[in-house]
Amino acid sequence: MVSTLNLCVQKKMNARLRIIICGGGIAGFATALLLREDHDVTVLEKSTMNQELGAAITLSMNASRLLRSSLARAGFDPVKARYVEAEKFQELHWKDLSVLLEWEMEMVTKKYNEPWWYFSRQDIHGELKRAALSVDGLGTTPHLELGADVDRVEVEGNIVHLKDGRTFTGDVIIGADGIHTTTGSSVFGQLKPVSSGLSAYRCMIPSARMRQNPDTAMLVDSAKVLMLIGPDRRIVAYPCSSWEFMNFVCIFPDDTERRQQWRTKVTVEEMVEQFRDFHPSVVKFLGMATDTGVWSLRDRDPLSTLVKGSFALIGDAAHAMGPHQGQGACQAIEDAEALRIVLKGATPEDVERRLIIFNELRVERVKTVIEYTREMAPKKTSETHVNHKTTQTYSDYYWRYKMTQEAVEAMNKHGFAMALIDPATGEISIT
Ligand SMILES: Cc1cc2nc3c(=O)[nH]c(=O)nc-3n(C[C@H](O)[C@H](O)[C@H](O)COP(=O)(O)OP(=O)(O)OC[C@H]3O[C@@H](n4cnc5c(N)ncnc54)[C@H](O)[C@@H]3O)c2cc1C
């Protein structure tokens, strides 16, 4: 017969926390997907459409490791997200297209035992959201509240106040509301993005069109991350959406005041003009774009803490960084996995102790990534020669990291007994 004490212990261990996630971007839905097994999750999203814009991201090995284990176990399907697997990395000189650096992806994907994937933002966001809200997933299906514009978080009492006056209460509140975080600013004081003095044009061009043109076919000869490195400007290109599109991000020094949305449309001519002195093939392929936007690149100084009471900050809200190392969303996915593990088996009473462990795991890591990313940003210069330092200088720090193992170890160190049953699925048991 099960004793009353045992039942109590069991009930405590099985307690499902009420978790409110503010923001339904990549960070918010990766976290909802991972937390739904053990907890009841509500996602509050400001917009009514909740759709990503036309641009792409690469998720390299520290993130694909998690996408293939814990997130896959929870229902994420990279095929549905229309991934393209990277084959090659190439840095070319802006003017003459001479090769500055080249390696087969295998060199690193074998070393770190994971693939490097490219996705369109719409596809990866759409798939994380689909899996997170699927009725067939693990645990309970999260509730998504659209048009829920968060005004502030009241840490005492764990209350989220919306601008329309509604309130939501949870055992844990997670701020995943991006670089202009309202939640973070309401808890830690105004968190201001810092202008990097750089902006980026983005455009997507159908790969089929590029293949047909002899001047641009070389760009689509393999699934490569292609970086055209100029002294002060940089173009990054790679395929996405099952090869339907080539994605271009064209970074340049920019002191003008721009709005901070990909939505800010500009003419293709403006973008081409900015890169007019690059090799003629580059000018040609940029001219093939039919639609382009511009984004002022900002980051934020690293925070000394990401938690307060039962509130935790994740994603760009916690660690906005430039795109120069392709780690922003990778770090958001690490955040989600760290939360899954520290909150495994949690009760409302021990949430704060557990979030302190989350903080220990994340503060130093994201601080270092922000610093490395800043070092790799293109700098304003009147020089015309390339002062070349490979963009992969800090790769080992990013890619060897195993968030699942690190978090389980940290929990054990702090007296929360748990074990990683299977690294391939990320399954954890509480021992
Ligand atoms: C040019 C460029 C290229 C990049 N390339 C890469 C790359 O290759 N690899 C990589 O890993 N990262 C890359 N990044 C970074 C990556 O895009 C971000 O780190 C990631 O998208 C952040 O996701 P997020 O969910 O934290 O924030 P967001 O995507 O900003 O989502 C925040 C969500 O919160 C919602 N929200 C905002 N305010 C409120 C509110 N008050 N109430 C409720 N909801 C709210 C928003 O509507 C949105 O849905 C790149 C970034 C840029 C700019």
Image (tube, grey):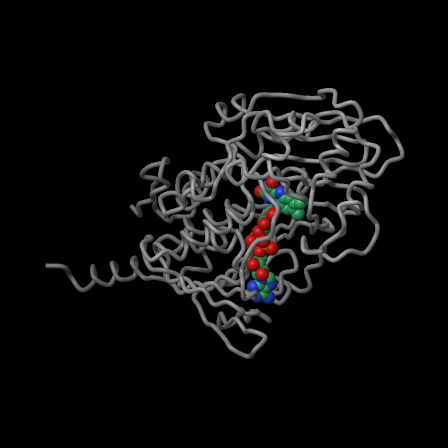
- Residue at (69, 46) in percent of width and height: 290
Residue 230 position, x and y percent, is: 79, 31
In this view, the residue in front, 101 or 189, is 101
Q: In this rendering, does residue 305 appear at all?
A: no
Please give left or right for residue 68 compared with residue 397 in the image: left
Residue 285 position, x and y percent, is: 71, 34
Q: Quadrant of residue 396?
A: top right
- Residue at (54, 66) in percent of width and height: 48
Where does the N terminus fall, quadrant-wise?
A: bottom left
Q: Is residue 218 above or below residue 203?
A: above
Q: Quadrant of residue 164?
A: bottom right
The residue sitting at the front extreme is: 212
Q: Quadrant of residue 193?
A: bottom right
Q: In this rendering, does residue 125 appear at all?
A: yes
Q: Is residue 318 above or below residue 242?
A: below
Residue 220 position, x and y percent, is: 61, 29
Q: Is residue 373 above or below residue 40?
A: above
- Residue at (47, 54) in percent of width and height: 29
Q: Is residue 158 above or below residue 384?
A: below
Please give left or right for residue 244 compared with residue 2 in the image: right
